[in-house]
Structures are given as structure tokens and as C-alpha cells.
Image: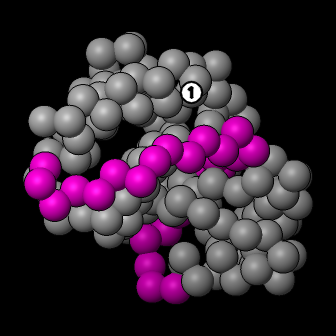
Amino acid sequence: MEKLLFSGLAVDRDVARVSVMGLRDRPGIAFHIFSLLATQQVSVDIILQTAGTVGGEPGGQTMDISFTVSRADLDVTLKTLTANQEAIGFETITHDITLAKLSIIGAGMATNAGVASAMFEALYECGVNINLISTSEIKITVLVDAEKVDAAARAIHDKFAKLMEE
């Protein structure tokens, strides 16, 4: 981990995960969803799209898209998507407000082998399950149970402090 410059941790408890499930897998679906939310001034953070699976219409594929919004934007997000269910073409929406976002921040996150593994090991060792993962060059973010985010942050901090000493 020679090139890793671990800067710190960030915790965000103001998060809701929304999952739009059973979407028709077709071009423009993500645009349709997120443009509708943009018109309502909803900021979206983590976005995860599953690979298409056979289902839905005969010969068609379906997929799911999960993303995070602030808890304050959850109601408008759900209302906007539900009001446009037929145009978007999804089966159901679920949401979860019992999660928190935990990020490790620093240079070389994506290019340094073992960074994600060390983070996930720390979470495993303290018994914290990962709900969603997002990575970038400077940040690895996970959604975890909000009740366990403080223990998770301590475990990750201790793991990376030890790695930085080596």
C-alpha cells in the first residue's frame, strides 16, 4: 500500500436507498428516471444498476436500479417515480432509511490493490454487512446499517491506521 494516501473517513447518516425493480431493460431508462428526479431538484448519489435478467415481457429483459437520496428527498422521489410508473415501466419500488453511507477517502483508492479488500475485511471482522458499494479514484463508499456505522468507522480507521504504519 505504498502509493495509498489515506486521508480519512466520512459518515453520512442522511441517506435513503431507493430501488426501482423490474425495469424494462432498454436504452434511455436511466435517463428517464434521473431526469424526472432532476426536474424535482432531487440530488442522487450512489447509483447501482444490475445486469439485465430474462423476465418481464416475453423475450424481454428486466433490471433493477438502486440509488441514494437524502432522507428529505425520499417522499418526492417516491411520489415522482410512482406517478410515472407506466411511462418508466417498472414493477415496484422499495426504499430503506435504516442505512448510512461510510466512505474512505484518499489518493490511489482505485489503483492500489488491496484497498477495497482491507475495507471489506474490517467490516467483516466487526460483523457489518455491506448493502451497496461505490468506488472512484479517490473514494470507496459503502452503505451499511446505520446502527452499526460508528463501529464500522472505528474498525476501518483502525485497519487503515495499522496499514499506514507498515
Vertical placement of residue 138 versus 32, above or below: above
Task: Give x and y (percent) for residue 35.
Answer: 70, 83
Q: Horizontal placement of 13 versus 55: left or right?
A: right
Vertical placement of residue 1 versus 110, above or below: above
Vertical placement of residue 89 versus 166, above or below: below
Query: Which residue occupies 73% across, 69% down?
Result: 43
Q: Based on the displayed image, in which of its 4 quarters is residue 109 positioned?
A: bottom left
According to the image, label 1 marks what residue? 149
For the C terminus, the quadrant is: top left
Res. 42 in view: yes
Q: Horizontal placement of 130 versus 16: left or right?
A: left
Res. 120 in view: no
- Near-viewer residue (111 or 74): 111
- For the record, the magenta segment spans 1-28
Magenta span has 6? yes
Vertical placement of residue 23 versus 98, above or below: below
10 Å crowding of disc 1: few (<14), some (14-19), many (20+):
many
Query: Which residue occupies 80% across, 60% down?
Result: 77
Task: Give x and y (percent) for residue 114.
Answer: 14, 45
* Kind of residue at disc 1: Val
